[in-house]
Amino acid sequence: MQSIYWVLTWACHRKCTHCYDDRFRPYVRDALTRVVAEGQHAYEKVIANLPDDMTWANAETGQRERTTLILAGGELLIDGVREELFYPALEAIRARWGEAGPRISIQTTGDVVTPEILDEVLARGVTGIAIASIDDFHVGMKGEKKFRFMQDVRLLMESRGVREVAIGAAKSEKLKSPDPSKRTKGDGPTFLFFGAQEDLWIGELWPRGRAWSNGLSNAGYDTNFCARWSGGRNFLKMHEVGSEIAIEPDGSIYPCCLKTKAPLGSLAEERLEDILASVAVLPSIQALNDGDPEGMGEASGWSRDVFREKSVAVDGKGREVANMCLGCDRYFEEILGAELKALRAERLGANKKTAPAA
């Protein structure tokens, strides 16, 4: 894959109003132990079931480049997550692939980074750090405060030789998410800033989680996240440009970072190649791979007109909103979720029959 976006845990030290998933929030005591345990139980299996070859073919240069593995939360650097899950996962990644492994990037709000933590992260092979809180939604970042925070981060990074780069997305293609193939390249670790602002990330917030329930999403029907970077487009094209999948803490995988209403399968159970090859037979999955969610139901009786009708819902402010992600949600709930569940059962049944006797 060109990129893999892996949420290791739902644990966070914030409960932002614009978050795309309600599960990202503070957990304390036993609740924190339980939510971190979900990732602890799955991460070794996930790593084992990722491709042996963590590269992709850059058609522009004719070279093979290393997969970018983006590790995120929640917040990976808080107490209770950092030593218990994040660092062991980093060490397991190094043990699995060694020097041939993926480029490791992390996402963090940045406000919990200390010189000591930065040293520990860099020593474990992290080469990219995305400070993902530069917007007015994160508490303490509104207005000019974010710019003072950015300067503090720059001073810390400079002290450790970590170079700042820009997101540099191709605006002509409306890619407003941090595409690792578009960033400035160079030697040594790098960092960048982004947030939910028009010029720094997607201006339209995803119709998901608290952003949806709080009525903060202004993404209309013409906002096709599926066709953007980190959307569904090209997710089936392993080892080619644009290929990306998303992973949840339990190993469930999805064709986009927004997360469809049902997973394609689980890396805690099966290899990624096997899952993608299986689901690729479905016309609806091919439509997502084309970045055309509106066409995902045509083979099963959902015309594009029906899809548009299903793409309307009322948000937390009582507004009627139309967005393709909402239509995709309804199609997964009514049809595709059951088809994916049946395919998974077939794969697991076949694997059980061919497994060697104990």
Image (spheres, rainbow, N blue to C red):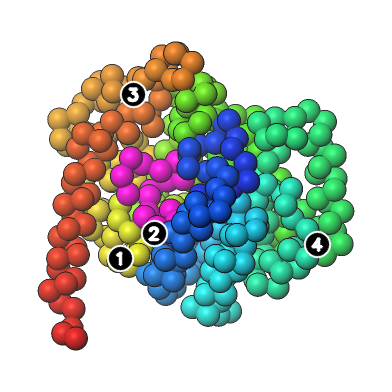
249 falls in the magenta region: yes
Give the image location of residue 266, x and y in percent: 33, 59
**Sequence-earlier tag: 2 or 3:** 2
Which of the image's four quarters has the C terminus?
A: bottom left
Give the image location of residue 86, x and y in percent: 58, 64
- Which residue is the site of mark 2? 251
Cα–Cα span, label 1 and label 3 = 32 Å
The type of residue carrying mark 1 is Glu
What kind of secondary structure does the magenta stretch mostly adopt?
loop
Give the image location of residue 248, x and y in percent: 43, 53
Residue 118, labelled with which disc? none
Q: Of tags 1 and 3, which is closer to the observer? A: 1
Cα–Cα span, label 2 and label 4 = 31 Å
The total number of labels drawn is 4
Q: Is residue 97 left or right of residue 340?
A: right
Of residues 38 and 264, the one drawn nearer to the viewer in this rendering:
38
Q: Is residue 143 left or right of residue 95?
A: right
Q: Quadrant of the rendered structure where residue 134 is?
A: top right
- Mark 4, Cα crowd under 10 Å, few <14 / some 14-19 / many 20+, is few
Q: Secondary structure at mark 4?
A: helix
255 falls in the magenta region: yes
**Sequence-earlier tag: 1 or 2:** 2
Cα–Cα span, label 4 and label 3 = 47 Å
Cα–Cα span, label 4 and label 1 = 38 Å
Q: Which residues are magenta?
A: 248-263
Residue 115, labelled with which disc? 4
- Which residue is the site of mark 3? 311
Residue at position x 66%, y 31% in the image: 137
- Mark 3, Cα crowd under 10 Å, few <14 / some 14-19 / many 20+, is many
- Asked whether the beta carbons under mark 1 and mark 3 sit within 8 Å of each other, the answer is no
- Asked whether the beta carbons under mark 1 and mark 2 sit within 8 Å of each other, the answer is yes
